[in-house]
Amino acid sequence: MSLTLFDKIWNAHVIDDLGEGTALLHVDRHLLHDLGGGKALAEISGRGLSVRNPELTFATADHVISSEPGRTGGAHDWAQALVDSLRLESRKAGVRLFDVGSDEQGIVHVIGPELGITQPGTLMVCGDSHTCTNGALGALGFGIGASEILHVLATQTIEQRKPKTMRARFEGELPKGVYAKDMILALIGKLGMAGGVGYALEYAGAAVRALGMEARLTLCNLSIELGAKVGMVAPDEITYAWLKGRRFAPRGARWDAALAWWKTLPSDPNAAFDREVELDAGSLAPQITWGTSPEDTIAIDATIPAAKPEALEYMGLAAGRPLAGTRIDRVFIGSCTNSRLPDLRAAAEIVRGRRVAAHVRAWVVPGSVGVKRAAESEGLHEVFLAAGFEWREPGCSLCVGANGELVEPEARCVSTSNRNFVGRQGPRARTHLASPATAAACALAGEIADVREFLA
Amino acid sequence: MEKFTVLDATAAALPTPDVDTDMIIRIERCVRTPRAEMGRWAFEMARYRADGSEDPAFPLNRAPFRGARILVAAENFGCGSSREMAVWAIAGMGFRCLIAPSFGEIFYGNCFQNGVLAIRLPAPAVDGLLEALGAATAPVRIKVDLAAQTVTGSDGKSHRFDIDALRKKALLEGLDAIGMTLAREAEIAAWQDADRARRPWVWP
């Protein structure tokens, strides 16, 4: 029988079929973060339970810690208390913590792949909806809630209903100035933000195969903005070359055995998907959102549509006008969507030798200490600093504002993150989602701008 | 977990599609507000004006919806962030049952973890309920019978809904999911032993 990538990984993790398409699944990797990790671990011990497999559980500080240069934890008492709790509880439970100040700290969905914790065919969960990011390596990753975190800590398993499958093919070759972020925003625009509800998505096609691993991570990251808990790319030579030698990746004979299994995972040629969609990557323009949902996306040179009057009012925009040329106040390059080395390189390429507009406050928040150091070794931080960007410390920062870093009310921010929801970056803050290169171009122009005009 | 059998209660309507969990509970509240106080902060951006008073434009502030325990909502309710505090906040407002054409999937799962019954009904049925509630000037009751899997509106019209047998049983009996899985420890251990041989590289 022909199977999809998703089916194969699902089947490999079924401990028991519970009927009606629901299964008890084994969890290979469980990631915790500072927003709820300490509390969850404390609740487990408080109930007289223990963490069943601490060696399969990893923790990092990312959501509530400051991104201020020189930070040692949270910028506020309440944030520091969460970091302290994660430190104490992970030590007590024997869970490895990538703490502030360590070489491995970073955004949970950046360090999972970067450290080789995420591997093809693994089933991963984390109390964060963007756990779908990990699917870029051919892993089955999805976000869970606080109660499910406790269930996984206590039992190393999770009950799930098997979703339907959808394949999104991107054919053709991406034009200059167009990136993975533009591909996925365009797909969300086409299908709508509920278009993927009930599906596990697989991204395929020539344009996906041509993407590097970091770009695939960006692609999979926004699966949940389609309503899909799971988004995946089949592992291939790009995956294996990227993963080999990473800290927690298998070595020696274990690598060889793993590789042999990983190569059996891609969807069989005749595998049937419940739904298929196709997009022409070659005809895409840089995308930017105009409203308060990731589905509210247009080509950078398009006019603002006459739809969703409440969203337009919130965003302070008028239908029928071009979005380009709209004055901005903030730029945020970061988040689990777009904070990896190639993202920073793409932005730096635009920024090099230019200046951020005087009225714009622009931040670069690398996704991890690993990304930050690699970027610094290439001198990217100097490019950003010379242009007037702030070069900050790794964490979630302005994507969600859980650490107290916010965009001011009615200020307009071009952000490389994943959600432009009402109030996401702060009460009444106005968010436009875009690629790192587009965000960089906007920072320089001081207004929403077409990155293609900045490319040689 | 509290059992759910039959709920015959006042219903409220929130006809906005794609209500995300950031809208339901702000991240600051997730971090800094005790669970018992979250109900007060549910939907705060739409529910309160800048001076802290209730905004009459927000549907759930309407008089006929006071004390409602059933919330009828629009497509893709609870999309976005996995924060379970969104369910705690809605439950804290008094809601025990949510009815919509579709839900954000993580939110949907989180509801059942907290004894909140989330019901998917076809869009025309939900539209009918939303319409009746939108026109109401006095409280309107809806009856939800989990065992029979029916929602009965004030017009007496009954709609049957689908639900996983496992979720239904857990709600009807108030079962503890962790306790049930812990009872299967031998099975989990056997699976892990076999997997150590099958996929040794997965095990540190």
Image (cartoon, rainbow, N blue to C red):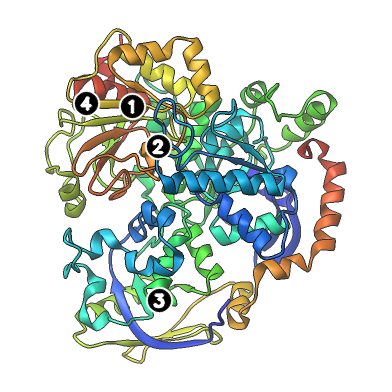
Callout 2 touching callout 4 (CB < 8 Å): no
Which residue has dot 2 on it? A397
> Which residue: 82% across, 50% down?
B192
Which residue has dot 4 on it? A360
Q: Observer-nearest residue: A54 or A131?
A: A54
Q: In terms of sequence position, does the residue under pointer 2 or pointer 4 come before the other? A: 4
Alpha-carbon span between mark 3 and mark 4? 44 Å
Residue A156 place in picture, x, y as percent: 71, 54
SS class, disc 3: loop
Q: Residues within 10 Å of mark 2 (few under 14, many from 20)?
A: many
Which residue has dot 3 on it? B95
Alpha-carbon span between mark 1 and mark 3? 41 Å
Q: Which amino acid type corresponds to the residue marked 2 in the rendered image?
A: Ser
Q: Which amino acid type corresponds to the residue marked 3 in the rendered image?
A: Phe
The reply to whether residue A272 is in sight is no
The reply to whether residue B50 is in sight is yes
Callout 3 touching callout 4 (CB < 8 Å): no
The quadrant in which residue B18 appears is bottom left
Give the chain of mark 1: A
Give the chain of mark 4: A
